[in-house]
Structure formats: structure tokens, C-alpha cells
Image: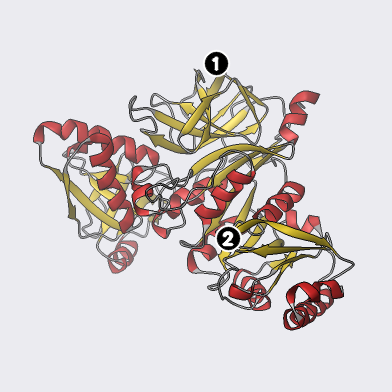
Amino acid sequence: MSAGGDIKKEIGRRRTFAIISHPDAGKTTITEKILYLGGVIREAGEVKGKKGTKAATSDWMTLEKERGVSVTSSVMQFDYQGLRVNLLDTPGHKDFGEDTYRTLMAADSAAMLIDAAKGVELQTRKLYEVCRLRKMPIFTFANKMDREGKDPLELIDDVENTLGIKCYPVTWPIGMGGEFKGLYHRLDKKVFYFERGREEPSIQDVQSWNDVSIKEKVGERLFEKLQEDMELLDVALGPFEKSEFLAGKVSPMSFGSAKYNWGVDIFLRLFAEEAPPPGPRLTIEGDEVDPFSEDFSGFVFKIQANMDRKHRDRVAFMRICSGKFERGMKVKHTRLGREIRLAYANQFMAQDRETIEEAYSGDIVGVNDSGNFQIGDSVSVGKSIEFTPMPRFSPEVFAKLTIKDPLKRKQLQKALMQLSEEGMVQLFYDPFFGLQDPILGVVGELQFDVLMFRLNDEYNLEVKLERQPFSVARWPRKKDGAIIGKSINGGAKLYMDNHERPVVLLAKEWDLNWLIKENPDLEFHITGG
């Protein structure tokens, strides 16, 4: 059923996007500038909060503030030019790729940040691939133009050749590094002149890039370079086609420096003009859920424990996919097969929260959770809906934990269960001993650093990490769908994951190849889902 006029209007003004990049490309810095321009914060923080400076809003964990690295996705909401924007800041580090991938499932578009000196880096390629598979519209922002870097034409070639997506430069830099003078806006026929120490540019209306008044401001050499570049672009590029952008085939590209807030406002205006409203979502049956449907639906893409340290809370982050959310509403929980009440819900500015009475398709809400939700759960009003599953990575690094105070063993078990439900660590156990002494699996080393820090900081537990001789986890299943027995051929021990699914933990790929050969009736899946 189609929603009423007021609901349609509210859904139509929602914009939900994620910022993706390689580490150190400036993602947290540009997030801060966007929040500053959106009127949410009075001063943009620094990634490393030095004494007397404000720390970055999106890096709210103690560890993030200490290290100056994002280790968890943050959700931030603000209003901009009549739009309600849901901004999802993601970890750039590869060890937290799984969290980023899940967050991308909740977004309708993405902003891809690249370092103008380094071009497209490895983690950017991986994250872009997820966007490409979802045919997600992508904006590109070439950052750090205040430093020497690649020629802008070379940067475009790098993006197009590495990622296979066309770029449409909306702005074009005049100079670079110490000689950076400003940006020419190709669509608006304006030049934005920047100076160090001044965030506000001086803006000049021009007839075209050929306007001689530009030469008076930037000098003959930079003016001639602008003319050469523009002649090439005008020949090579046709007009901007929004349909190609929405299909994920063309990326509007802009340039600037997040550090100095140069060009970030231009990017934000471009986003407001071109970003799509909430789109339809696929169910596991292959049906599309209309975002403008009157019936509420949503899915959980993230769970976070201890956002409020005083109350040891647990928050399930839910993307609303259709209809209107109302506090206290009853919904069908597809996995549990029963109704539950969504009593308390919040909207967020990183860890700061505000209780809300209503929200709409496209919004991200944090639901207070007593243990009902897992990552990937679907809820709905009306018929039961199950959205396509969340991606899950196979762990590659394994360890066990020993605790100094044996009286706190139960507390450790509870903490590990909570953190595994967040998705930051996977638990495996010997069926004979149960979850008393689990093996922990993570995608990357840094996740163990974060785990140890959080166990100490949030749960007051002193633990020691003991590496385990595994690098591969696979979930064996019968090809005909039947349940496998208590053992398999080839001598590999069967463990269980915390969802009671059989799993093998192996030292190397060679061992996996041996098991495949010895068990022709089995398939060894890379995830347990």
C-alpha cells in the first residue's frame, strides 16, 4: 500500500550515504567538515584530539581518540538544504572491512574519498567493489589538493582504469600544493579562490574557463594549464547524465582539501542536488520492497554494546526500508517468528543520542536491545519480510584468551558473547567443552588490539592473548542440504560456532584442499550464514 502524502514527503527528503576510503585519505576530517557545514557542530575536530583541541565527533571510542584511527562505524544525522541526511562514517582500515561492508548495505549512495597524491589505493578498490555489485551511485572527492600530488587528468585515468567507472569532474583545480589557487566549477561557471588561513573562498562568476579575468587572479602559467585541461575535458566528455550516475556507471568528481575546508561545501551542495532518495530493497525471495510503502520494514546492520558506559547498554542499528517508524510500535521479528515492541529508539550523532518518536524510510535508528537482535535480522509490519543477508568474512587470525582473575571467567564469557554479537569477533568452541574456553577468530590483527583494549576499558578485565595455529575457517555442509555428522573424512576436528553450526579450523589452504578431496559430498563454505 502506498504511503500518505506527508509520509511520502518525509521519505522523499531522506538521503543516506556512507563515506569510504583507504586509511589516511582524510575520511574522518571530511566527515567533521560536513557536520560543521551542516550546522551540527560549532567547530570541526581534529582526528587526534590534542590538548586544547576538539576530538573528531565520529571517532567516539576511547581507543579511536587515543590512536587517531576509526575502528567502528558511526551514524550521524543532520538537516541540510531541506534534506534529512544520514551520514555513515566507516573504518578505513582493512581489518575492519566487514563492519564497513555491512554499513554499505544500509546506504543509498557513497562518497569515495581518494588521496590526490596516492590515487586509488587497495582498500578503496575493495570497498568500491561492494558498491559496484549493488550498483550504488558514487561521488568522488579528490582530497589533499593543498599538497603536491598526481596531475588531475592522471588521477581521473587512475580511477577509471583501476575501478572501471567513468568520472565526470564537476570542479577542476587551478594549481596544486603551494600553488593551489582555487576551483573552477564547470556546471555553475564560477571560480572559487582559496587562501590558507581563510575557509571562505572569494567567488567569481565567469563566462567560461576561457575568461581572461581568471588569468589576472592566478597568473599566466596556471591559466594556460586550466585552458589545456578544459579543452581536453570538453572534447572527451559529454554532458552529465544523471541516469548513468544513479546506475553506478558515472561518478561526479570534485576536488579540494578537507583539512582547510576547501571545496567541501561545493561537494555537499552537489550531494544535495544529485544524491538519490531511499530506493527499493531486495528480499531473499527476490522481491523489491517499495520505500514509499505504508507498511514499515527494516533490517539490523550493526550492534554496538556499551555506547552508554554507565548503563551497559546494547543498541541495534536499524535501517528503515519502508514506511514510518513510531516509538512503541509492534513489529514482526522474522527470525524469531514472533512480535516484539520497539519501545525506545534513538537517532545519533556518533555516541550522542536523542530519543525519537518517529522516523521514516531511509533513516537509521538505534533500537535499545535486550538481546532480541542479531546482525542481519529483519522486522516488518504486515507480512513477514526477510531482506538479503549481511556479508560475513571468514576469519584469518585466531587466538584464545586467559584471564588473570579466574573469578571473572563468567564475566569474560558474557563480554565475549556481547562483542561477538556486534560482529567484531567470531567464537568457535569444542562441542565437548562448550563455550567455556572458546577460540576467537578475527579478520585482521588490529581487531585483537581493539578487543583487548575494550575488554580492559569497558569490562575491567585483564586478559592475555594466546595465538592459535589456524589461518582458515570453513563451514562444511552436505551438497544435498542434509545435516553433517559428528566427524568428516580427512582427520579434521569439527568445532561449532556460537550459532551451533559445524566449522573446521585449519592451519593452511593446503589442509582445506585435502579435505575437499577427501569429502566429495561436502561443500566448504567461506561463511556460516
Residue at 55% from the left image edge and 73% from the top image edge: 117
- Residue 71 placement, left or right of 403: right
Q: Residue 126: percent from the left, percent from the top?
A: 51, 62
Which quadrant holds the N terminus? Answer: top right
Q: Which residue lies furthest to the right in this view?
A: 207
- In this figure, which residue is indicated by the disc labeled 2? 113
Q: What element carries label 2?
A: strand
Position above or below: 288 against 273: above
Residue 92 seen by the camera: yes
Q: What residue type is labelled 2?
A: Leu
Q: Earlier in the sequence, mark 1 or mark 2?
A: 2
- In this figure, which residue is indicated by the disc labeled 1? 328
- Dividing the picture into quarters, in which one does residue 180 lie? bottom right
Residue at 48% from the left image edge and 30% from the top image edge: 335
In terms of depth relative to the viewer, which is nearer, 499 or 216?
216
Q: Badge 1: few (under 14), some or many (20 or more) residues near its Cα, within 10 Å?
A: some
- Residue 155 placement, left or right of 529: right
Q: Which amino acid does label 1 sit on?
A: Gly
Q: Residue 143: percent from the left, percent from the top?
A: 59, 64
